[in-house]
Image (cartoon, rainbow, N blue to C red):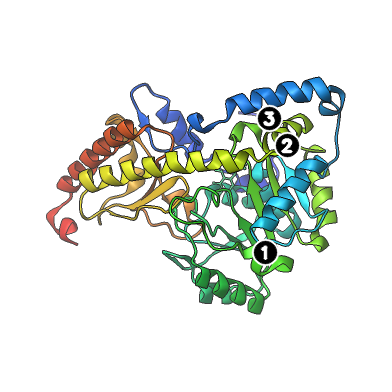
């Protein structure tokens, strides 16, 4: 199509989100989707949001509907700081920036730290949305060798010169893995020795099922860690509220990047959310989400045990929203997706979550959006598709 516009160089690094493309497929009637990372709508505190909205409009309509401070609504920033101090993060006044989802936090941090051609170290695999956010700054990604506990400390030690390492310690998207206390210590030591600052993304930390995860990286190395949090998974993603906690040296530039991006995050939403959380609603509400998601995790684990071939590798996650599967040798999760959708089930292939060479056998399943009975139906359909595909492999590939 002819156009007088000329695209900027950075647009070459913009790709359609594989997940959004897949979500389109899943809108077909009859498809059970395990693809989207959508929190269960049953977990939204609708009544509390309704009451808070009415109160904000009644008590402070003019302030709520006016332009507001770029840093965010003061009382909400104070609430975030107090909450993080509970987790052991030393947050001083003025270090909290309210953002339009933590996704905006990733975008701003990218703008702050990444030059074209500079290196950003990431986990293998890592959150696709961070790869997308950082890609517009045209970095080189260094994919850190990783295991069941996250990146290997020696891989991070070898990443000296990287502008930052982007890490997801708790119930990682996409693998669901959590870093042990020892791994956190070792990663922080490696990062300090290599002089590589950390960007810690923690939207899932509160969604633990068995026991709370160890203290955040930001509690271990406050001056070397930018911490990102979100209200999306504990309240509702449609509010688009997240936050960045930055070491004081970064705050002025971060604020300038925020101003340039959108002046400020919706003040109305911030006041509503502050009204919802100020009296401790999350302490009562989050345990109900944990219980709901733990039951769904159990339902999916049972279905996977029943329906997936023994050669498929997976572990039940201890929190968060995702199972990560590795199909038997010879299968490719991207190639298998159209067959799965035809059989009535959708998932996200693992390949787009890799900054380096992808493991094409991997895929991500969300266990929180569907009810347990639907999870069983969906996993049974996936099991049939995998068994059929396995049976079609040439005999040699099958035993390999
Ligand atoms: N980080 C991770 C790891 C995520 O999974 C998500 C949401 N899928 C985000 C950041 C962005 O979340 P939000 O913008 O809704 O806070």
* Element on which disc 2 rests: helix
Task: Please say whether residue 47 is visible from this viewpoint.
Answer: yes
**Closer to viewer: mark 2 or mark 3:** 2
- For label 3, the crowd category at 10 Å Cα-Cα, with few meaning under 14, some 14 to 19 and many 20 or more, is few
Give the residue displayed 65% in from the left and 60% down from the top.
199
Mark toward the start of the polypeptide (2 vs 3): 3
User: Which residue is denoted by mark 3 in the rendering?
Assistant: 3
Q: Quadrant of ligand 1?
A: top right
In the image, 18 versus 102, the foreground residue is 102
With 227 as the anchor, is 395 left or right in this view? Answer: left
User: Which residue is denoted by mark 2 in the rendering?
Assistant: 274
With 231 as the anchor, is 341 left or right in this view? Answer: left
Task: Please say whether residue 119 is visible from this viewpoint.
Answer: no
With 145 as the anchor, is 222 left or right in this view? Answer: right
Which picture quadrant has residue 98?
A: top right
Mark toward the start of the polypeptide (3 vs 1): 3
* Element on which disc 3 rests: loop
- For label 1, the crowd category at 10 Å Cα-Cα, with few meaning under 14, some 14 to 19 and many 20 or more, is some
* Element on which disc 1 rests: loop
**Closer to viewer: mark 3 or mark 1:** 1
On residue 118, which mark appears? 1
Mark toward the start of the polypeptide (2 vs 1): 1
Separation of disc 3 and disc 1 at Cα? 32 Å
The answer to whether 316 is drawn above or below residue 65 in the figure is below
In the image, 49 versus 192, the foreground residue is 49
- For label 2, the crowd category at 10 Å Cα-Cα, with few meaning under 14, some 14 to 19 and many 20 or more, is many
Give the residue displayed 73% in from the left and 62% down from the top.
90
The C terminus sits in image quarter: bottom left
């Amino acid at each position: 199509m002819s156009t007088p516009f000329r695209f900027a160089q950075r647009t070459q690094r913009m790709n359609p989100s594989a997940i959004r493309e897949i979500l389109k497929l899943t809108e077909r009637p009859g498809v059970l989707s395990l693809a989207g990372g959508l929190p269960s709508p049953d977990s939204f505190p609708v009544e509390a949001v309704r009451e808070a909205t009415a109160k904000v409009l009644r008590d402070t309509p003019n302030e709520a509907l006016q332009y507001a401070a770029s840093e965010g609504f003061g009382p909400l920033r104070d609430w975030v700081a107090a909450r993080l101090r509970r987790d052991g993060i030393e947050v001083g006044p003025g270090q909290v920036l309210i953002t339009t989802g933590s996704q905006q936090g990733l975008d701003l941090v990218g703008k702050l730290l990444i030059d074209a051609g500079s290196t950003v170290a990431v986990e293998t695999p890592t959150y696709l949305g961070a790869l997308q956010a950082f890609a517009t700054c045209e970095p080189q990604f260094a994919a850190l060798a990783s295991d069941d506990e996250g990146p290997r400390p020696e891989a991070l030690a070898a990443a000296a010169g990287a502008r930052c390492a982007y890490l997801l310690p708790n119930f990682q998207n996409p693998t669901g893995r959590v870093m042990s206390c020892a791994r956190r210590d070792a990663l922080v030591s490696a990062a300090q020795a290599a002089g590589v600052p950390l960007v810690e993304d923690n939207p899932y930390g509160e969604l633990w099922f068995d026991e709370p995860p160890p203290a955040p990286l930001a509690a271990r190395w406050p001056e070397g860690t930018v911490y990102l949090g979100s209200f999306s998974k504990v309240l509702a993603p449609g509010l688009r509220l997240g936050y960045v906690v930055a070491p004081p040296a970064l705050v002025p530039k971060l604020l300038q990047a925020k101003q340039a991006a959108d002046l400020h995050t919706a003040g109305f939403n911030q006041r509503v959310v502050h009204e919802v959380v100020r009296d401790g609603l999350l302490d009562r509400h989050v345990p109900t989400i944990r219980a709901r998601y733990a039951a769904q995790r159990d339902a999916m684990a049972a279905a996977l045990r029943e329906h997936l071939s023994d050669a498929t590798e997976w572990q039940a996650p201890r929190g968060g929203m995702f199972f990560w599967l590795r199909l038997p040798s010879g299968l490719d999760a991207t190639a298998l997706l159209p067959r799965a959708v035809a059989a009535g089930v959708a998932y996200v292939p693992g390949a787009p979550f890799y900054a380096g060479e992808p493991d094409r056998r991997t895929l991500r399943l969300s266990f929180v959006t569907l009810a347990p009975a639907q999870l069983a139906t969906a996993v049974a359909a996936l099991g049939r598709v995998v068994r059929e595909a396995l049976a079609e492999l040439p005999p040699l590939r099958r035993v390999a």
